[in-house]
């Protein structure tokens, strides 16, 4: 707790000194009488209480949010002794908005009294932030002394990317041996009927196709196709970013990955993540709801980090990038290094689908409207389409996606067919 004198204390001290000096110089006693109340105020002005004489409690409705969720903050001050004026500042990061947010709370309490404030804000962007400790200023009733402190504990709040609903998904070309939702060409104990053949020794009675057997006069059985799951690895481009948060190219890319990952996990597939940027980070493929939470947590701190050198995908272990996996890359294609990495990956035989996030409109929203902006965006559009054409010429499967449109619409052309890919070398 740091005790300081307020500006009012300095003004009264200066006024008292001038009254005494002028009284001595002019020999007028009334100036001495005028200075008596000022001297008394300076001598007997009480200092405010210390931080140990009150308790500040701040709680939040939830420490885990999704973009668009509302957060309720409750601040409670309880006085153990009589208090002058207490001022509390509740700073919030820029990703929280509110039409009626007052970050400066002021009150005065008697012993045993409490004061409570409820603040409602809305989280509009992916973020990891901390609330507290909070700056507090205590003023005496006279206003001549002020003490400042930082009180309260730290509260960590995580705002995760919004998960859009996606029902139509790109179909993996290769499957694993575990049970899933994809019908394979092999016969087994699945639910999808494959072909009908004559009954043979060792067949189970429950496999007998009675309508066909009665019609043909001998026993026939139905063979079912096995149902398998697949590995899906998302490749997130964090080399560069365009637009302004919370709707930058990286933000919409992360939402796309979150929506696709949630849909694949619902189909019992294994999902992994590789962040390709200033740092090369990866998350090995796994299934289940826990894996989705881990993936969202891994994308929470994702941000572009400028670097002249980047590691290649050769540093990624085989367990994080299986050969039979469907690789879905999401990128605005601003940095050529990411495009080169995709060409190399496709050349190695991986089944690769590139979702090209158009950065033009995202950037236009962040710039002031002008003829220069229009011309620059038109030229950028031509360059972007030319880059897509070159990448398609290198054998990449590309889906162009404009963030203002649903991702499911852009994926309509690939949802019913398997993403092609050669034999990985």
Image (tube, helix red, strand yellow):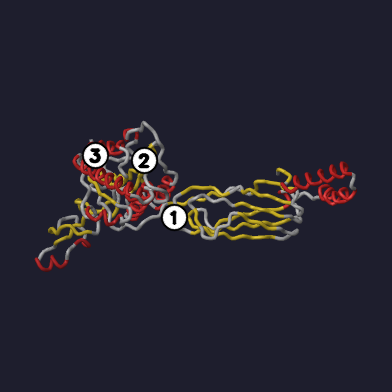
What x and y, as percent, mark residue 302?
Answer: 42, 43
At x 38%, y 40%, the residue is 282
**What residue do we see at 88% from left, 48% from top?**
32
The answer to whether 241 is drawn above or below residue 98 in the figure is: above
Mark 2–mark 1 CB contact (< 8 Å):
no
Task: Tell me how far mark 3 sits from mark 1, CA to CA.
Answer: 34 Å
Identify the residue under disc 1: 67
Tell us which disc is closer to us: 3 or 1: 1
Q: What is the secondary structure assignment of the residue under circle 2?
A: loop
Residue drawn at x 30%, y 54% is 407
- Marks 2/1: CA distance? 22 Å
Q: Nearer the viewer, residue 343 or 360?
A: 360
Q: Position of residue 392 (x, y in %)?
A: 20, 43
Q: Position of residue 334 (x, y in %)?
A: 32, 41
Label number found at residue 356:
none
Q: Secondary structure at mark 1?
A: loop
Where residue 10 appears, as percent x and y from the top left, is 75, 45
Circle 3 crowding by C-alpha within 10 Å: few under 14, some 14–19, many from 20: many
Residue extending farthest to the front is: 26
The front one of 363 and 421 is 363
Instruction: First in sequence, mark 3 or 1: give its number.
Output: 1
Q: Earlier in the sequence, mark 3 or mark 2?
A: 2
Q: Which residue is mark 3?
A: 346
Residue 351 appears in view:
no
- Do tag 3 and tag 1 residues touch (Cβ < 8 Å)? no
Q: Quadrant of the N terminus?
A: top right
Crowding at dot 2, Cα within 10 Å, few <14 / some 14-19 / many 20+, comes out as some
Marks 3 and 2 sit apart, C-alpha to C-alpha, by 22 Å
Q: Which residue is mark 2?
A: 240
Q: Is residue 54 left or right of residue 262?
A: right
Closer to the observer: label 2 or label 1? 2
- In the picture shown, does residue 347 fall above or below 410? above
């Amino acid at each position: 707790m740091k005790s300081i004198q307020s500006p009012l204390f300095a003004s009264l001290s200066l006024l008292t000194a001038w009254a005494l000096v002028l009284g001595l110089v002019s020999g007028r006693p009334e100036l001495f009488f005028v200075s008596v109340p000022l001297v008394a105020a300076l001598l007997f002005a009480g200092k405010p209480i210390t931080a140990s004489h009150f308790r500040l409690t701040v709680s939040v409705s939830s420490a885990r949010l999704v973009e668009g969720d509302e957060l309720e903050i409750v601040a409670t001050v309880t006085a153990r002794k009589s208090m002058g004026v207490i001022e509390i500042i509740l700073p919030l990061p820029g990703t929280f908005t509110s039409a009626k947010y007052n970050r400066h709370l002021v009150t005065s309490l008697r012993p045993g009294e409490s004061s409570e404030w409820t603040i409602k804000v809305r989280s509009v962007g992916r973020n990891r932030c901390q609330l507290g400790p909070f700056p507090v200023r205590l003023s005496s009733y006279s206003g001549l002394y002020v003490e400042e402190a930082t009180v309260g504990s730290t509260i960590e709040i995580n705002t995760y990317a919004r998960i859009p609903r996606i029902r139509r998904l790109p179909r993996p070309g290769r499957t694993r041996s575990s049970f899933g939702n994809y019908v394979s060409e092999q016969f087994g104990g699945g639910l999808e009927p494959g072909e009908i053949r004559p009954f043979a020794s060792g067949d189970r009675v429950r496999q007998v196709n009675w309508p066909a057997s009665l019609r043909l006069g001998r026993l026939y059985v139905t063979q079912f196709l096995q149902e398998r799951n697949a590995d899906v690895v998302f490749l997130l481009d964090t080399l560069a970013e365009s637009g302004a948060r919370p709707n930058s190219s990286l933000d919409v890319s992360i939402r796309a990955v979150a929506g696709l990952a949630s849909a694949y996990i619902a189909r019992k597939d294994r999902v992994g993540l590789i962040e390709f940027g200033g740092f090369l980070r990866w998350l090995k493929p796994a299934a289940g709801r826990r894996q989705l939470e881990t993936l969202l947590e891994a994308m929470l701190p994702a941000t572009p980090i400028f670097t002249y050198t980047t590691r290649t995908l050769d540093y990624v272990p085989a367990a994080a990038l299986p050969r039979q996996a469907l690789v879905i890359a999401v990128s605005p294609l601003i940095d050529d290094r990411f495009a080169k990495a995709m060409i190399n990956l496709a050349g190695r035989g991986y089944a690769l689908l590139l979702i090209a996030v158009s950065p033009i409109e995202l950037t236009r929203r962040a710039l002031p409207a002008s003829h220069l902006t229009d011309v620059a965006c038109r030229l950028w559009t031509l360059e972007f389409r030319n880059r897509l054409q070159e990448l398609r010429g290198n054998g990449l499967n590309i889906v162009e996606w404009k963030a203002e449109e649903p991702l499911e619409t852009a994926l309509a052309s690939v949802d019913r067919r398997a993403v092609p890919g050669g034999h990985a070398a």
